Image (spheres, rainbow, N blue to C red):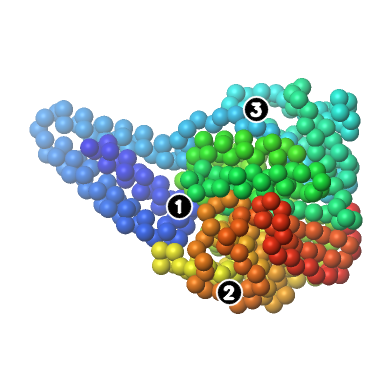
């Protein structure tokens, strides 16, 4: 009993020491009714056990104490191992947009995968099938692999192979009607019973369809239901890989991805340390320049401002200082700012005032044009003070309830279709189309921007 109670106590301690777990409790206060009795029980039982052992004249009374300490040690190691409840397993190859600039100015692309047993691998690639004349290799055996394609030329199709495996192909920043095109989605929640995997696959098919000519798939988080669950991550990567080995993906960590130490698995699989983080020095937030006048910021905002660290704030505000207000500036993150929704467990899941107070004026002052978020499972367009906010949390998770609160400035809302945002940037114009999973348009928006500089 002492071992069990100490295990429970260590669990409570672990919950309290992990900022992501605290954010979870803040937004899901109903779990406090479970956690608090556990905390009381976990303290009461070992306290009584120790008192009885100390009062016992039997020398063997020390045994329960030792067992209790052993139980505490085992429990602490378990819970402080960042949610590692099962061993890592092999992960398939994905193409990832990397936080470094290629020779032509666009962001670099890397082939990324994970092996349970360390291996030393080589990436071979070229512009003709069967003639892979370029090679990039690893210097030593490792679990996490991230090999960057060097000197890629935009609008060019490449064939590639890892260690002689069957060739795959992708086009590096293909031109689409004179500009660039990106697919943006969030909240697939793979592993949840409520996930619509058929809809998720349809969206992935849209992303990888060569005729659509998407340059990248921006995935804004909550990719899995629980970020500590190895089997969910493996299933998700196996589901995504046939498509994300064709079109590069760039993912953000969502609140579900970071649950119970899941942020460590996220760093291992979603943006491993072998990849560069030139703009921010962090694997959780980045800046991508699509041209000298087109900038994309990806921020780590999981539940809201809880993960907006002082370091991230200083980096973001410093980066904005050097950007011309006439440039096209896009911000992407997981948590919403303005949103129409309803209350859940007594808390409003709409217009997040902390997020608004922290960011909206900053966005307005620095000429941010577009903001894409997820978290709420809906698609919505809200305009405020010249900033266009889009919610794209419809990648496959269960739909949110119909809203009881409509955010002022809401121009379009959809709570019944899985889908994504289709972002197109051309010379002097930018457009966003909110589409169903099969590609059908639900809503479109377009505006002029003063810059006209595409690489």
* Residue 21 numbered tag: 1
Give the class, few, some or many, for how many residues have Cα within 10 Å of label 3's Cα (few <14, many ≥20): some
Label total for image: 3
Q: Is residue 211 above or below residue 126?
A: below
Quadrant for the C terminus in the image: bottom right
Residue occupied by mark 2: 407
Query: Which secondary structure, mark 3?
Result: strand
Q: Is residue 336 visible?
A: yes
Q: Earlier in the sequence, mark 3 or mark 1?
A: 1
Q: Are marks 3 and 1 in contact (CB under 8 Å)?
A: no
Residue found 61% across the figure and 52% down from its top: 395
**Is residue 308 at all visible to an observer of this figure?**
no
Q: In x, y percent, where is residue 449?
A: 83, 69
Q: Seen in the image, is 437 located left or right of residue 58?
A: right
Residue sitting at 65 percent across and 69 percent down? 412
Say whether residue 216 is left or right of residue 397.
Answer: right
Percent across and percent down for residue 297 are 71, 58
Q: Nearer the viewer, residue 355 or 191?
A: 191
In the image, 211: left or right of 365?
right
Residue at x 45%, y 52% (from the top left corner): 21
For the point 63% across and 24% down, the residue is 118
Give the residue at mark 3. 142
Distance, label 2 to label 3, CA atoms, is 49 Å
């Amino acid at each position: 009993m002492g071992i069990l109670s100490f295990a429970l106590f260590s669990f409570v301690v672990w919950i309290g020491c992990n900022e992501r777990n605290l954010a979870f409790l803040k937004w899901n206060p109903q779990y406090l009714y479970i956690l608090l009795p556990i905390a009381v029980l976990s303290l009461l039982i070992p306290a009584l056990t120790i008192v009885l052992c100390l009062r016992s004249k039997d020398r063997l009374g020390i045994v329960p104490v030792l067992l209790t300490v052993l139980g505490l040690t085992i429990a602490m190691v378990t819970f402080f191992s960042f949610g590692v409840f099962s061993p890592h397993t092999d992960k398939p190859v994905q193409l990832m947009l990397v936080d470094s600039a290629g020779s032509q100015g666009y962001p670099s692309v890397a082939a990324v995968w994970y092996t349970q047993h360390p291996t030393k691998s080589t990436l071979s690639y070229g512009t003709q099938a069967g003639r892979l004349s370029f090679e990039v290799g690893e210097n030593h055996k490792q679990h996490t692999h991230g090999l960057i394609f060097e000197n890629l030329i935009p609008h060019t199709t490449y064939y590639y192979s890892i260690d002689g495996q069957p060739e795959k192909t992708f086009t590096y920043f293909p031109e689409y009607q004179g500009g660039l095109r990106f697919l943006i989605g969030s909240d697939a929640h793979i592993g949840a019973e409520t996930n619509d995997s058929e809809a998720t696959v349809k969206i992935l098919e849209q992303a990888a369809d060569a005729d659509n000519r998407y340059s990248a798939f921006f995935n804004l988080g909550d990719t899995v239901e629980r970020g500590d669950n190895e089997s969910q991550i493996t299933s998700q990567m196996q589901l995504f890989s046939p498509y994300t080995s064709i079109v590069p993906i760039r993912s953000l960590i969502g609140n579900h991805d970071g649950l119970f130490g899941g942020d460590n698995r996220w760093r291992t699989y979603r943006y491993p340390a072998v990849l560069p983080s030139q703009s921010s020095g962090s694997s959780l937030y980045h800046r991508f320049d699509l041209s000298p006048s087109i900038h994309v910021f990806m921020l780590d905002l999981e539940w809201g401002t809880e993960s907006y660290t002082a370091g991230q704030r200083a980096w973001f505000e410093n980066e904005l200082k050097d950007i011309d207000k006439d440039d096209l500036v896009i911000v992407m993150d997981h948590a919403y700012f303005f949103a129409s929704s309803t209350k859940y467990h007594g808390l409003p899941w709409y217009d997040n005032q902390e997020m608004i107070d922290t960011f909206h004026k900053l966005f307005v002052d620095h000429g941010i044009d577009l903001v894409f978020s997820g978290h709420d499972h809906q698609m919505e367009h809200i305009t405020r003070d010249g900033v266009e906010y889009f919610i794209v949390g419809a990648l496959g998770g269960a739909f949110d309830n119909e809203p009881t609160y409509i955010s002022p400035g809401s121009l379009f809302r959809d709570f019944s279709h899985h889908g994504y945002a289709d972002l197109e940037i051309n010379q002097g114009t930018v457009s966003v189309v909110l589409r169903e999973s099969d590609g059908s348009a639900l809503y479109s928006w377009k505006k002029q921007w003063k810059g006209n500089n595409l690489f």
